[in-house]
Structures are given as C-alpha cells and as structure tokens.
Amino acid sequence: MAEFKISRQEIISLCRLCLAKDLASIDIFETGSETRQLFTKIVACLPVQIMTDDSLPKKICEVCNSKVDDFYQFWTSTAKNQKQLNDWLQIATTDSIKTDTTQIKVEADDTRQGEEYDDYDDGD
C-alpha cells in the first residue's frame, strides 16, 4: 500500500468540508459579514465540530458555501413548519375540547305519561 504524505500547509489550504484543494477561499469565522453567519450555519446543519483554535482548515469553497446556505435555509424552513404544525394541532385540540364539552339538554318524553304498561310476561 502506498504511503500518503501531506504537509500541514497543504491540509490548511483544503476546503474544511469537501477537501477540495486550492479552492477554499471563504473564511468560516468571518466576522464582517452579518448575513453569512457561516459558522452558525455549519454547526446547525452538519455533523462537523469546528473551533477557532483547532489545527484544521478554517475556510470552505464556493460550492460548499452554497450547499451550507441551502441546508440552512431548508433547516430553518422545516423548523418554522414544525412550529406551525404544532400551533395548528394545539388550536385543533382546543376546538375539539370545546366541541366535546357541548352540553345537551335532556327532556322527558311527555307523550307516554298516563299510559299503563302490562308487566312483562316471561312465561312463568
């Protein structure tokens, strides 16, 4: 089996997510961009542990950036939809309880008053 050697500098130049070589140009921890929030999106959507003080690459490529944005958008959409479903279910349950507790007034059947009934003859 051939031995694979890679330098620390070569590792740092790789995309943190897909390992693309020499394409990683977007800083994961960039603080100047309020809209990017790349670190937050990666942590929310991917099984990757990223820390500012680890020795691993701190940049990703454009392809991964686009995918992370798509994943995060899908994640936030599904979280919002889950909340909406729970809200609807709570409303439906509350409406059902109101419907189930409707009181029904029972009135006696006055048409049979005064009628006499023969005792049931069971043959004895």
Image: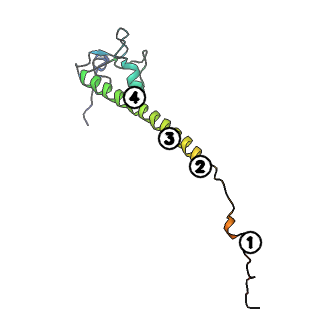
Amino acid type at mark 3: Leu
74 or 24, which lies in front? 74
Location of mark 1 (residue): 114
41 vs 94: above or below: above
Front of the two marks 1 and 4:
1
Q: Marks 1/3: CA distance?
A: 52 Å
Applied colour scheme: rainbow
123 or 75, which lies in front? 123
| Outermost left residue | 22
Amino acid type at mark 4: Thr
Q: Earlier in the sequence, mark 2 or mark 3?
A: 3
Residue 40 occupies which quadrant of the picture?
Answer: top left
Location of mark 3 (residue): 89
Q: Marks 4/2: CA distance?
A: 36 Å
Viewer can see residue 19 = no
Other residues around mark 2 within 10 Å, as few (<14) / some (14–19) / many (≥20): few
Amino acid type at mark 1: Gly
Q: Label for residue 100?
A: 2
Other residues around mark 1 within 10 Å, as few (<14) / some (14–19) / many (≥20): few
Location of mark 4 (residue): 76
**In this image, 86 relative to 26: left or right?**
right
